[in-house]
Image (cartoon, grey):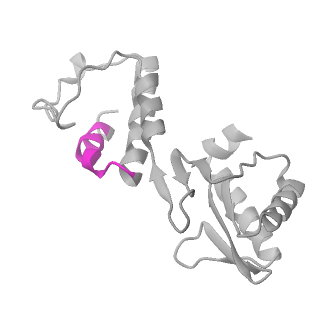
Amino acid sequence: MSKALYGMLKSALLFYKKLVKDLKSVGFKINPYDPCVANKMSYGRQMTVVWYVDDLKVSHVDPVRVTKFCSWIQSIYGPCKVNRGRVHEYLGMDLDYRTPGVVRVSMIPFVKKILKEFPEELGAVAPSPAADHLFKVREESESKLLPKEQAIIYHVVAQLLFVTTRARRDIQTAIAFLTTRV
C-alpha cells in the first residue's frame, strides 16, 4: 500500500477523499484553512485529527476518547501504530508536551539521521551553508552522477527541503539552489 499511496498522486487523493468522508460520517468538520485538519466536540472537549498522507495525529484530553477513535480507524483501515505519552515523533519532528501548556518542537534527530545516512564523510562545521562556490554551475559533462548517486542526492535534498519548511529557514537559499541541480 505504501508504494501505491506515495507513488501515485491519484492514490493519495483517493485516500484523502475516503478519510475525509469517514471522518465527516462520525461528526468531524474539516478545517476551512487547512484541509488536513479535522475537529469535533467529543464529551464537551475538542478532538483534533491532523494528517499528512496516511500519517495521523489525534489529540483529546481524555485518552479513552483517543482509544475509541483509534479502534474506529483501525476497523476501517486495518492495524496501525499507536504512540502515547508526552513525547512523539511525527513527520520528522519531535513534539514534546512534557511542560503543561507548552509544546517544544525539534528536528535535531531527523537532521542527524540525514547526515548519518549521507554516503560521504562530511567535513568540519561551517559558519554558513553558503560556500563561495555554492552558485558556480559546472558544465553538464563534468557533473554527471551515476543513477544510484543521483537517487541518494535527490533523496537528501528532498529531506533537507522539508527541514527548511519546518525548522531551518537559514538554509533555504542553499537547498533551493540544490533543487535545481538534481
Quadrant occupied by the N terminus? top right
Majority SS type along the magenta span: helix
The quarter of the picture where residue 174 lies is top left
Residue displayed at 35% across by 48% down: 164
Give the side of residue 14 with respect to residue 107, left or right. right
- Where residue 15 appears, as percent x and y from the top left, is 71, 57
Residue 92, magenta (yes or no)? no
Residue 177, magenta (yes or no)? yes
Residue displayed at 47% across by 53% down: 105
Name, please, the residue furthest toward the right.
75
**Above or below — where is 61 with respect to 126?**
below
**Above or below — where is 93 with respect to 21?**
above
Q: Nearer the viewer, residue 103 or 118?
A: 103
Residue displayed at 69% across by 62% down: 58
Name, please, the residue furthest toward the bottom.
44
**Above or below — where is 173 with respect to 23?**
above
Quadrant occupied by the C terminus? top left
Which residues are the magenta region?
A: 167-178
Residue displayed at 47% across by 56% down: 104
- Where residue 65 appears, as percent x and y from the top left, is 81, 68
